[in-house]
Image (cartoon, rainbow, N blue to C red):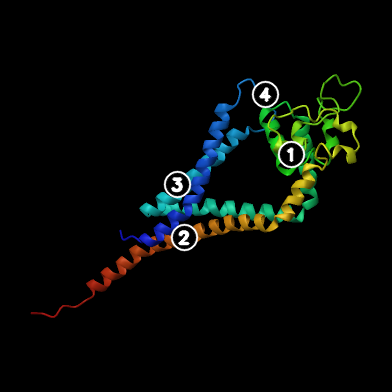
């Protein structure tokens, strides 16, 4: 069968970023699963390591179907790749539209989810590391304020709380962690007892939900560029797959019409 090397080359180059991302997801998920302590209690609905492995495997399988279909001109694989990618694209667009229309509901659900994560802090090592990363990255503490940590049994600010961390916050809320050579995990002790104007000298007092929304607004062009680039890549892959399916289907028709044309030629008698 005749080939179109240029089109196949563009198709395969377009799928390389998706394959690289899926391989990174799988590698990170496997590493996190292997490195995780066996005696850690999972309180999350789904293990993040397993989620990364699952998403990476699905993405790699889908891109592999597209590459194999393009290389071997197998229309069923190309159609499967095209259909899956189209469904993913529609789901992404629908999620964006729903999130924009129901912003208040999304923010409310996000608030409840983050508050639940604070309650479960120290019960799950993965969740604890994720919260610490977010608080250090966005320089925030709690969901709406640093006093949200009273929702956690270890940091609850009450006279009956026997924990040494009573009325405190995690060390990831502390200001100046970047310049410290030795990590002071006790820097957040008792900080909930302080008024906000005094506490903000030593810890971040702004909630993480507010900080994340503010960061998104300040980096709107970056977020829009990354989202648009991903959507354009998916649209380009869909168009290339559809174009190759059409080309493969036309080849037998062109060959048949050429054969009929050759058979219809009348040769003069000798």
Q: Residues within 10 Å of mark 2 (few under 14, many from 20)?
A: many
- Measured from the top left, where is residue 38 in percent x and y? 60, 21
Q: CA distance from mark 3 to mark 4?
A: 36 Å
- Measured from the top left, where is residue 128 in percent x and y? 70, 31
- Rendered position, 94 above or below 152: below
Counting residues from the start of the chain, the first of labels 1 and 3 encountered is: 3
Point out which mark residue 64 bears.
Answer: 3
Q: CA distance from mark 4 to mark 2?
A: 46 Å
**Which residue appears at 66% of the width and 31% of the height?**
126
Residue 80 visible at all: no
Callout 1: SS: helix
Q: In the picture provided, is 214 more to the left or to the right than 40? A: right
Counting residues from the start of the chain, the first of labels 2 and 1 encountered is: 1
Q: Is disc 4 in contact with disc 1, using a CB cutoff of under 8 Å? A: no
Q: In the picture provided, is 125 more to the left or to the right than 22? A: right
Residue 138 visible at all: yes
Callout 4: SS: loop
Residue position marked by numbered label 2 in the rendering: 240
Counting residues from the start of the chain, the first of labels 3 and 2 encountered is: 3
Callout 3: SS: helix
**Which residue appears at 72% of the width and 52% of the height?**
216
Numbered-mark total: 4
Residue position marked by numbered label 1 in the rendering: 135
């Amino acid at each position: 069968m005749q080939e179109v090397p240029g089109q196949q080359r563009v198709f395969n180059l377009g799928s390389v970023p998706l394959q690289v991302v899926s391989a990174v997801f799988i590698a990170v998920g496997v590493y996190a699963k292997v490195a995780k302590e066996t005696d850690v209690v999972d309180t999350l609905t789904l293990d993040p390591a397993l989620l990364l492995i699952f998403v990476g495997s699905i993405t790699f399988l889908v891109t592999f179907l597209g590459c194999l279909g393009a290389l071997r001109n197998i229309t069923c694989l190309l159609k499967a790749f095209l259909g899956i990618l189209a469904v993913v694209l529609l789901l992404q667009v629908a999620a964006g539209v729903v999130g924009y229309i129901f912003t208040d509901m999304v923010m409310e659900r996000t608030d409840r989810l983050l508050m639940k994560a604070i309650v479960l802090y120290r019960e799950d090592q993965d969740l604890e590391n994720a919260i610490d990363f977010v608080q250090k990255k966005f320089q925030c503490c709690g969901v709406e304020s640093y006093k949200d940590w009273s929702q956690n049994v270890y940091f609850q600010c009450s006279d009956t709380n026997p924990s040494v961390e009573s009325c405190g916050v995690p060390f990831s809320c502390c200001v100046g962690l970047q310049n410290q050579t030795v990590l002071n995990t006790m820097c957040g002790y008792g900080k909930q007892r302080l008024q906000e104007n005094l506490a903000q000298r030593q810890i971040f007092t702004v909630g993480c939900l507010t900080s994340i929304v503010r960061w998104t607004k300040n980096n709107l062009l970056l977020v829009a560029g990354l989202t648009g680039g991903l959507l354009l890549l998916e649209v380009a892959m869909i168009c290339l797959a559809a174009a190759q399916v059409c080309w493969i289907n036309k080849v037998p028709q062109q060959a048949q019409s050429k054969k009929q044309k050759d058979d219809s030629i009348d040769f003069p008698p000798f």
